[in-house]
Each structure stands twice: as structure tokens, then as C-alpha cells.
Amino acid sequence: MMPLGIGNLNWGAMTARWRPAPDPSRRATGAGRTWLLLITAAVLPLLLLGGWAGSLSAERTRANTRALARDTVELVAQRLTAELTAQLDLAQALAASTALDGGNLDAFRIEANRIEALHPLWQAIMLSTPAGAEQMNLPQASAHPPSPSADPSFWSVLQTRLPAVGGIGPASTAPDARLVTLQVPVIRNGALRYVLTVAMAPDAIDGILNHAGAPNNWIGVVVDASGHILARTSAEGEPLGHLASPSLMAAIAHPQADFRIGDTMEGVQVETVARILPGTGGWTVAFGIPARMLREPVRRALALLTAACLVSLALSAALAALVTRDMSQRREDERRRAGLALLASEERRLMAVEAAELGTWRWDFGVDRFDGSARCRAMLELPPAAGVDEGWNWAAQAVLAGDRAALDETMRRCARHGGGFCADFRVMRRNGAARWVRATGRRLAGGDDQPPSVQGVIDDITARRQAEHDRLDLLRRLAQAQEDERRRISRDLHDQVGQTVTGLSLCLKALERDGDLSPGRMQSLQAMVVSISRDIHQAAAALRPSVLDDLGLVRAVQALATNIAEVSGLRIDVQATGFESRLSSELETVIYRLVQEALTNILKHAHAHAVRILLNHAAGRVRVIVEDDGVGFDVDGRTGGNDASHLGLSSMRERLALVGGTMTIESSQGAGTTLFILLPVAAKTRETRS
């Protein structure tokens, strides 16, 4: 044991001598470093904020450029759709000519020539039968388009009977000229008579594309459903009628994507956005923005941000160096003070453990090494010398076999899942007596030089266990004495008072036979005597029902239920199984009183209409279930009843504690209450009396 006076030492005075004396020059240097630290800390956020603002501005510029590209594509798509719609409307008006009603092709030719002269974009007007036979062809001298049936849009008109926009095709007389076809059905009396084909020069499409207001370095293009170029800006190098670049074809194949990166025919990397024109059979307008134009602001912003980060890193390194130097100067003083505080804390801990007469132990479960203090080894009856190969299984051999498995499971569960535990177990002393020991511990994660372990303290609780056993034994004997006293009072009431009342009844009968009193008077006196006898009998039964001793638990519970049902009007159903032999008198009394208390609580508080009682004796246990359909109560909140009902439940739990039983309550407001009672049965039971 350490001297008790150690707790009164002035630890502040002991540690004060380790503090260095104040140095004025060091104080001035520290103040300068403090100002430098503050200035550096203020500059760092400004640099990072400036770099972040530049990056944000570049991203905003990039987003604005992309938004402009989307708007330009939408504008061109709307204009092209409007232009094609106007041309289709004009072609449909020509197809509605009355000259075609009677098949007068000469009159239709005159009208077609007049309209062609008014529309310079129309290069040819052709009229074909649904079979593809050409009925009329009015090409200008400079353009001779191929047969209309060679365009897929011709067959689309035959299937849908709706106008269709074809692709771009070559002119037979001018190889460099490219024409766009418009196919319109000629329907008379519900039948498709002809297909009117208008070959149109794509100059209007080219004009709309080049006057969309896009920057000069943007590359705009309009392609048909097959990917052939219909119009282009001056920046695009592909000729009309040729297939577009692979990157543009990929963008056209996925028009729902926002921007796609690819290369043009000239090798310029662009980000392309595309939109499909409605009602054109797959025409697409697309604009490509040079990727360099989008990346340059971001690259400059990233360069600025990188420079700001490098400067910040340099300042941070300087700041860290200053802080490290300042901390290193203080660390020595703190280490000295921490050493003294740790020494004092360890001394106090050892004193507390010794004063509480506790033993300490440690199990390094990773390497299975167990170690304990001298007092711990003495409590566990282990040898005092520590061995290097001592593991947990070696230490667990000191525990009695009946408690060893539970303690081992508790220890290993703590090692696996962490947390704390508290376990009571027995150890056999050398003199043959059992010692009750309580182990309390917790898992520690360990550190760099310490493995994970379970550590705790151990305490001898034999005296406490014996006191608890004596208290329970005393309560059991008191309860038995109460039952004996009730049995005696019951016997006295039955044998003495009952006989006296019987004699009184016989005397009254004789008086009725020989006396002068009227018969009505005698009958009244006899009824009173009978009532007194019944009341005394009921009182005797309440103190100690004779049916419990004579006929057993089941018959006693049934009699109790019958009496209560007659008085209260409750419907009480009693079912019992497994009671071929009698239980001990103590256990039968406890169960009877528990059922009696439960029925009393139901009568007082439940407002029930029906009660069900189940008794089962099996596998060395007695199960009792009492269920009612009353108002119920909140088990946790204790609502729905008064304090008396809770006192009744407490009394039932005290009776159960004497015989090692348990009780569980299930109830809720308006749903009734159910009691689940479980009691262990001793190995010996009384045989049924004959």
C-alpha cells in the first residue's frame, strides 16, 4: 500500500520548478512571429479567393458560349423549318390545281411554268404516277434532276400520303449543282393519283445558315437524313452533297447529347451541338465551336489558380515552419508537465484500486496473453508467478465448470464487438468453499506499441451474495409463516365458529317445533344463521382455501373463478394441462395467490367482460397466462390504472422473486391486458392425494 499522505502533496509546487523563467527577448521574438503568422494567414485566403474567382469567371464564359451555341442552333432550326414549311405549302397549293382533277396535263403544265417562273429557287417540277412513271418534267435548261422515284422520300409519300422532304441529289447536266426535292401527294376522291416533285436549289438554306449571327470561327452545317451536306458556313470545307465528317455524324446520331467533341475534315477540334428539324424526315442543323476557343479562358484561369496555389503553398510552408518552431519550443515544457501529471495520476489510480481492494487484469486477445495483479491471482486461486505462455483458457480453469461457459462467451463477445461487460462467477477455494467474484471490463483498441485487449477489475462479492441469499431466505420463511398462520385461522373458523353456528341453527329449529314463536319468525332467524355460516365459510376460504390442500391447484383455481364469476358476472374460462402430479405446497400457494391477485386487479380496474386463464405444467416449468378484454393500460407510462393496481403487480413480482419466477405484461389502451408468468418447478413433486 502507498502512504495515504501522498494525496495531500502540492503537485503544482512540484511542477513549477520545471517551468523555464520568462525571457524578455523571447517574448519580443514571439510577438513578431505572431504578427507574421497573422499576416500570412490573412493573405492565404485572398490568394485562393482570387484564383477561385478567375476560375469561376472562365467557367461562366464557357457556359455563356455554349448557351449562345444552343440558341443559334434553335434559331436556325426555326428559320429552316419555316422556310421548308412555306415551300411545302406552295407545292401543296400547286398539287391542288383543278387542272389535275380531270387529268388535263397541258393546262397543269402552263400553271406549273407560271409558278416556276415566279420562284427562282425551283429548278424543276415533275409529276409521276404512284408506279414511278414520269408524266411531266419541267426542268430549266441548267438542271435536269434524276427520276423522283430514286429519292426515298417518294416512297414515303406513297406509304403515308403526306408531304415529305427529301435529301440532296446531283443534277444530271451540272455535276457541281445539288438540288433538294420536295415530294407532295396529289389525292383525288381519296385515291393517290400522282406524286408532285419540286427540285429546289438549297440557296435559301445556305442563306439562313450564313446569316444566323454566329461568330466567324464557328462552323455551321445542315445535313439531310443520310448525312449529306445541304448547306455550310464559310468555315466548313466539305462540298455540298458529300458526307459530313465522322465527328459531325456522331453528333447527329445523338442529338439529345448537349455537346460532343470531335474533329472536322480540316482537323480542327470542335465541340458540336445539333438539333433535328421537325417534319423534314431527319434533317439536322449543327454548329461546331472550336475547342480552343472554349478551353483558352479556362486554361488561363487554371494557370492563375495554380500560381495562387503555389504561392499559398509557399506561404503555408513558411507558416507551418513558424508554427512548428513555436510548438517545438513549448513541447519540452508541456512534456515535463505531462510527465509529472501522468505520474501523479498513476499513483492516485493505484491508491484507489488498493483502497477498494480490487484486483486488475488484462487479456491481450490478439496474442492470447492473460496477466493479472497479485490480488487478482489471489481471488482466482492462481499461482502468484506470471508465466509468458499464460492465456485466457488457462485463467478460465479457475472458474467453476457451471459458470465457465457463460464467462468465456461474455469475454469473447466483448473482444469481438467491444463495449463493456459485468459478469459474476464462482471460484473454488483451496478449502473447498466457493467464492463469488465479479469481473468488470471493457475492450481497448490498443496503440502502436500495445495490442488490442480487454482490461478491467475483479472484486470479491461473496459477502454480498451471502447477504442477498439470506435476505431471500428470510422473505421465503416469512411468506411461509404467513401462509401457516392463515391455515390455522381458517381451521379455527371452520371447526369452532362453524360448529357453533350449526348448533344455533339446530336450536332454532327446535324452538320452531316446540316454542310459541310464529313460523315466519323462525324462518327468518334460520336464514340469518345460514347467511352467517356462508360468510364465515367464505372468509375462511379467502384466508386459506381448503380445496387447495385437498384437491390441488387446478381445482382451487377453478373454484376461485366460479365464485368470482357468480358474484361479478364475469365470464371466466380456466384451462389446465400437464398437472398429473401435485406441485410443492409452496409453489401451489404462490400460483394460487398470483391468479387471485390478477383477478382482483381485473375486477377493480379492467372493466372487463371475459377472462381466460391458462395453466400449463411441462418441461420442469409452470406457465400461467391471464388474459382479459378490459380497458388495458400503458405499461411504460403507467396510465389507465391507479396506484393500487401497480402495488398489486409489485406484490406479484415479490412473490415470484421468492421462487425464481418471472412475469411479463402486455397491454395497451383499449386492447386488454395479458400476464405471462413463468415459474421453475423443483425435481420432486407431491403425488396426488387419494
Image (spheres, grey):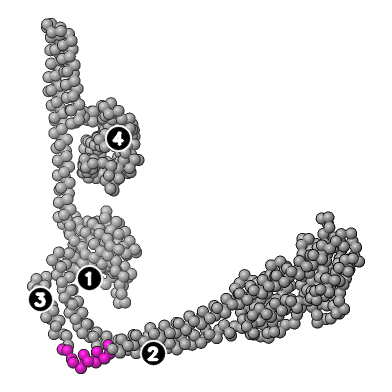
**Which quadrant, please, contains the N terminus?**
bottom left
Q: Is residue 313 left or right of residue 206?
A: left
Residue appearing at x 16%, y 18% in the figure: 529
Q: Is residue 26 magenta?
A: yes
Choose mark 3 or mark 1, whichever is in front.
3
**Where on the picture, by quarter, is residue 7?**
bottom left
Q: Earlier in the sequence, mark 3 or mark 4?
A: 3
Q: Is residue 128 magenta?
A: no
- Identify the residue under disc 3: 9
Q: Are marks 3 and 1 in contact (CB under 8 Å)?
A: no
Q: Secondary structure at mark 2?
A: helix
Any part of residue 587 in sight: no
Task: Please give the label number shown on residue 607.
Answer: 4
Q: Is residue 650 left or right of residue 139?
A: left
Tell me the CA gap for discs 3 and 1. Answer: 34 Å
Residue appearing at x 15%, y 27% in the figure: 491
**What span is in magenta?**
21-34
Q: Position of residue 265 (x, y in %)?
A: 69, 83
Choose mark 2 or mark 1, whichever is in front.
2
**Which quadrant, please, contains the C terminus?**
top left
Q: Is residue 308 left or right of residue 580?
A: right
Task: Please give the label number shown on residue 206.
Answer: none
Q: Earlier in the sequence, mark 3 or mark 2?
A: 3
- Identify the residue under disc 2: 314
Q: Is residue 365 left or right of residue 526?
A: right
Q: Earlier in the sequence, mark 3 or mark 1?
A: 3
Tell me the CA gap for discs 2 and 1. Answer: 56 Å
Q: How many marks?
A: 4
- Identify the residue under disc 1: 386
Q: Earlier in the sequence, mark 4 or mark 2?
A: 2
Amino acid carrying mark 3 in the image: Leu
